[in-house]
Image: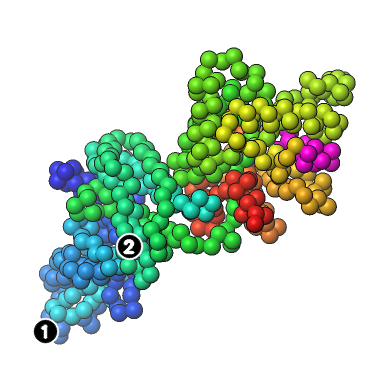
Amino acid sequence: MKKVIGIILCLAIFVSVFAGMNVFATDSGAVSFYQSDYVKVAGTISSEDIREEDYTFEGRDVTLTLVNKSTGNVDYLSQTTLDEYGNFEFGFYQDGLTYGNDAVTSHEVKLNLSGKNVTGSITTSSVISKFISITLLPAYDSFNDKIKLNALIRNQYGVPIEYSLMAVFYGEGDRMIEVKKLSDNVSETAGDEYNTFMEAYSAPEGTKMVKFFAWHNEEDILPLAKSREFDPNENIDDKLKVIFKLDDLGYNSYKKYDRAYEYFKSYGISQISMGAIAHYWYDYYDKEDYETAFLPTVRKWIADGVEIWHHGDLHKLSSYDEGAPINDYNYENFLEDSYEKQVYHLQKAIDTIEGDIGGGYKLRFFGAPGNKMSATTIQALKDVGIEGVMYGPASLFKNETELVNLEGNSIEEGMGNPVLEKAVAAVEEAESEGRDYVVLQAHAYFNDDAAYEEMDRIMAYFMSRDDIIFMTPSQYYDYKFGE
């Protein structure tokens, strides 16, 4: 391990990936920082700090001391030589720093020149990550009283390194309550790859804040990257609820949707929704792996928080364009079909999808094929037990009080082509209209590698905001309208 760490130190000199954590001044005039990686501190000492009998800066030593504010221990002590202009620069790793259990650990930087405190001479500072990078996206599932964590760890240079994922729970006064190891196994990563981890668990009683770490050595407890704080008691009322609506799920497309599920899960998000088309289920009953692969995959998604919603029986809209009679049951068009025909197709899809999923699963939301429906559809949906609609025409719901309609926006320019600007525009539109939710429509069946690269841009936008939370349509319904 020491050899590995030595290689890391050499590599890190050339790495300039900033971890987003800055050293900052405190009221006492000292400088503090929380757990970090490679720290750079630089500045310039004024001539006012030099005694009159000294005529030059050059050759003088300035001493940096790093004190653990939780334990009081001196965790780091180093000297460097000033140049002729009084400039100095320290670069050090947090290797060997200790961590107490009385408070959230931070460290205080003090700078000394011949017995004089010159901490105020620090002008620039930064924290630089090592070659292991980590993305932590914790989320609180208020419906199940669970905290979910996803850690996306990438090894950029191919040097093998072991790590463990842990959570530290703090209560009142930042006092540590519990340290929880999130996996019984020590993982190892080597090469340009992603490792993901996800677990749901309840926070200990009295928890006010959770910090997540990836550690390469459980004895030293050194974070590989900065911690991510999360308050399980935060109020979500002021957050924008983002609902992903992925259309056209069936046996013929489930592997593409499983990729989408794994993609969102890699960002710590399982609260997405998929619209099922019934004939893409029963048309494939003769497939050998329908029962052994397709249905177990769908049940896996549901167990992890994904919602399946009703996207029609046939999703065949061309009957009237082709001159077919209006009572032709080989087509469905919720914009023009009769009440009887709509109820027939709605119920057939419900019986198929709910029956195949099993376990008492209920389809609660509906999204019309082509997003086209009529006032007749509203009555038919009520009569078959659907509770809400996504993407329903707003004009149909002006006086509607019994059926919820969640307005939506496509984030695609053509099926399977998500675009960051459209996602941002959808969020801004919802905010300008005073809505506390936004429904984002996409079609995972058509997504290729380029589409997921663009989705990375979209997810980076969401991750940059702390006022967004992800929900399924039924979760939002229960949050907004439940007792």
Q: Position of residue 90 (x, y in %)?
A: 22, 63
Among the two numbered marks 2 and 1 on one chain, the one whose residue lies closer to the N terminus: 1
Give the magenta range. Answer: 367-383
Left or right of 368 in this view: 476 = left
Label 1's element? loop
- Decide if residue 361 is in sight here: yes
Q: Which quarter of the rendered picture does the C terminus lie within?
A: bottom right
Q: Which quarter of the rendered picture does the N terminus lie within?
A: top left
Any magenta on residue 382?
Answer: yes
Up-down relation of residue 464 to residue 262 (above or below): below
In the image, what residue type sits under mark 1? Glu
Q: Position of residue 433 (x, y in %)?
A: 70, 57
Residue pointed to by mark 1: 53
Left or right of 405 in this view: 51 = left
Q: Which mark is residue 177?
A: 2
Alpha carbons under labels 2 and 1: distance apart? 54 Å
Frontmost of labels 2 and 1 is: 2
Q: Residue at x 78, y 44 (%)?
A: 393
Between 274 and 40, the residue placed more toward the observer is 274
